[in-house]
Image (cartoon, coloured by chain):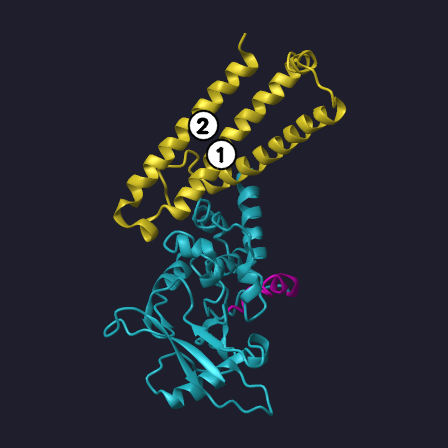
Chain colours: A yellow, B cyan
Amino acid sequence: MVTSATNFSRTGLSDWLVQRVSAIVLLAYSLFIFGIFVLYPELSFEQWSGIFSNNAVRLFSMMSVLALCGHAWIGMWTVATDYLTTLQLGSAATSVRLVFQLGCALLITVYLLWGIQIFWGS
Amino acid sequence: MLVSIYRYNPETDLKPAMVDIEVDVPTDRDLMVLDVLNLAKEKDTTIAYRRSCREGVCGSDGMNINGTNGLACITPLSSVVKPGKKLVLRPLPGLPVVRDLVVDMSIFYKQFEKVKPYLMNDEPAPNIERLQSPEDRAKLDGLYECILCACCTTSCPSFWWNPDKFIGPAGLLQAYRFLADSRDTAASERLAGLEDPFSVFRCRGIMNCVAVCPKGLNPTRAIGHIRSMLIEQSA
């Protein structure tokens, strides 16, 4: 068993499941947004804000933001542990990777808070 | 024909180099790559490589042939080189080079050892042998034939990036060989050792292992089965 302190879930299985489930949510949301543009080619601001005042749409949007955050964290963690290793960067690798992951975590938090503000703010 | 061979002796050379050797290859028949390498060694006796059975059973002469891993002894020259082109031989990628085409396989064996590649059964042994139905035995086909040549594992980028953490296709094929064995009673213990984010889950399913396996085995499918077992156990 290989242990790692920098991913949150501890098991590869939950990472794997989160990655797949979140991908399905993101695909469904992308199709939904694409569908809106197809259905309303001349979309006005009133129609747009009307669609997003619906609670079901807001909930779906929020779910997608959460899915994006989870997906991005696991994806970036995987990329970092593949390419920012001692094999490639020598002894500086761990520090470089921690800075990189901190940056990712910060960005993901900003996206999450921003999403909440957009969909549930006044 | 021209044979370009990776030469490196860590004790005397500062860095590796590709060296071309002109070899007289008979045109009336198709040689195996190992035959061509043997002819090259007649010209330059200092070339180092491993070989033994010369019929794809021992797994000693795994090497990178014109960009693809394979066993030199069962790879026909005509299948890798077009007429008039160079034969390029390099050591298996991702492992430290001991000399020329000889690599240090310690980390490969270490990963193999991790999956406990032997039968574990906590029930008392019967007088003669542990029996298995023909159907249960059939489940091991496509799993037990691995000869540990390391062609698959050293063609896997996930192994290149994390050779100390990702078990690699050869080891995982063996892991599933014992998970699938009806006589083995340690499945949950085996699975517990594999559920971390690296051992199994670094497999991204690109199937390089399947493409290069000289025995025609399918480690990606075995890894998929392990993943399904992990999900079933945890769900």
Q: Which residues are magenta?
A: B134-146
- Circle 2 marks a residue in which chain? A
Q: Is residue B122 visible?
A: no
Residue A56 coordinates in the image, percent (x, y): 66, 17
**Residue under label 2:** A108
Say which residue appears at 45% left-offset and 40% top-offset: A11
Q: Crowding near pointer 2: few (<14 within 10 Å), some, many (20+)?
A: some
Answer yes or no: do the residues labelled 2 and 1 have beta carbons within 8 Å? Answer: yes
Say which residue appears at 53% left-offset and 78% top-offset: B85
* B136 part of magenta stretch: yes
Q: Is residue B70 visible?
A: yes
Amino acid under label 1? Ala
Residue A22 higher or lower than B181, as above or below: above
Report helix, strand or loop for mark 2: helix
Left or right of A77 in this view: B25: right
Report helix, strand or loop for mark 1: helix
Query: For the stretch drawn in magenta, what is the main secondary structure?
Result: loop
- Circle 1 marks a residue in which chain? A
Residue A71 coordinates in the image, percent (x, y): 51, 34
Front residue of B132 and A70:
A70
**Residue under label 1:** A72
Residue A100 coordinates in the image, percent (x, y): 36, 36
What residue occupies the far top of the structure in this picture?
A122
